[in-house]
Image: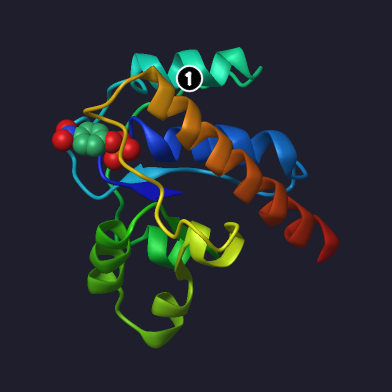
């Protein structure tokens, strides 16, 4: 799960998907910038997750590395900027194929980007949570079926 700072959206996406997916899948998240490296998720993400029974307290922000594009099978990006940044890091067509916009494949078709809630309020974090929860339901269904 990839966003900009790895403190608001992608830690939520990581926590939500981990709850839904079978335990033999490794779910992680990262940001395209290192500005918040080592920091916990934003307090608003932690609070919204907690209100839905998801604990993301253990999360610490980290930037994406070139190695991630080898290690992970799928890189879900929250918005077009994250997508463009990940694509620009890719060294091969195979790596590019791993990268997608999470809501393009697993959204409801209306909203294609997960809005950045950083400069917004708790209500927008809740909306981000609900968007990601629905998308992760669809992802988990697809991935759990493929086993
Ligand atoms: P995120 O949100 O990409 O969902 O973690 C943001 C976090 C930090 C900043 C912007 C968005 N920032 O400008 O520092």
Residue most toward the bottom? Answer: 93
Q: In the rendering, at what x and y percent does residue 142 appear?
A: 75, 61
**Residue 62 seen in the figure:** no
Say which quadrant the C terminus sits in.
bottom right
Q: Depth check: give the residue in front, 19 or 137.
A: 137
Residue at 57%, 32% in the rendered image: 15
Q: Is residue 134 left or right of residue 60?
A: right
Q: Depth check: give the residue in front, 139 or 104.
A: 104
Query: Within 10 angstroms of label 1, few (less than 14), some, or many (20 or more) residues?
Result: few
105 over 16 or under it: above or below: below
Residue at 45%, 17% in the rendered image: 46
Residue 16 placement: quadrant: top right
Q: Mark 1 points at which residue?
A: 58
Disc 1 C-beta below 8 A from ligand 1: no
Disc 1 element: loop
Q: In this view, does 111 lie to the left or right of 121?
A: right
Residue at 30%, 62% in the rendered image: 80
Taking the image in four quarters, ligand 1 sits in the one at top left
Q: In the rendering, at what x and y percent does residue 124 appear?
A: 39, 29
Residue at 61%, 50% in the rendered image: 135
Q: In the rendering, at what x and y percent does residue 62 appear?
A: 30, 38
Residue most toward the front? Answer: 110
Residue 132 placement: quadrant: top right
Q: Depth check: give the residue in front, 63 or 134.
A: 134
Q: In the rendering, at what x and y percent does residue 40 appear?
A: 34, 20
The way the protein has been coloured in the rendering is rainbow
Q: Is residue 141 left or right of residue 35?
A: right
Residue most toward the left? Answer: 35
**Residue 56 seen in the figure:** yes
């Amino acid at each position: 799960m990839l966003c900009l700072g790895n403190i608001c959206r992608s830690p939520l996406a990581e926590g939500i998907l981990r709850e839904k997916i079978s335990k033999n899948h490794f779910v992680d998240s990262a940001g395209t910038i290192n500005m918040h490296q080592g920091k916990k998720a934003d307090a608003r993400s932690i609070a919204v997750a907690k209100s839905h029974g998801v604990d993301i307290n253990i999360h610490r922000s980290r930037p994406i590395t070139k190695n991630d594009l080898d290690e992970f099978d799928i890189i879900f990006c929250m918005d077009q900027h994250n997508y463009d940044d990940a694509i620009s890091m890719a060294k091969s067509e195979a790596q590019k194929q791993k990268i997608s916009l999470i809501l393009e494949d697993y959204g409801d078709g209306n909203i294609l980007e997960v809005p950045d809630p950083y400069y917004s309020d708790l209500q927008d974090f809740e909306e981000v949570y609900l968007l990601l929860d629905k998308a992760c339901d669809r992802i988990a269904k697809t991935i759990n079926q493929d086993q």
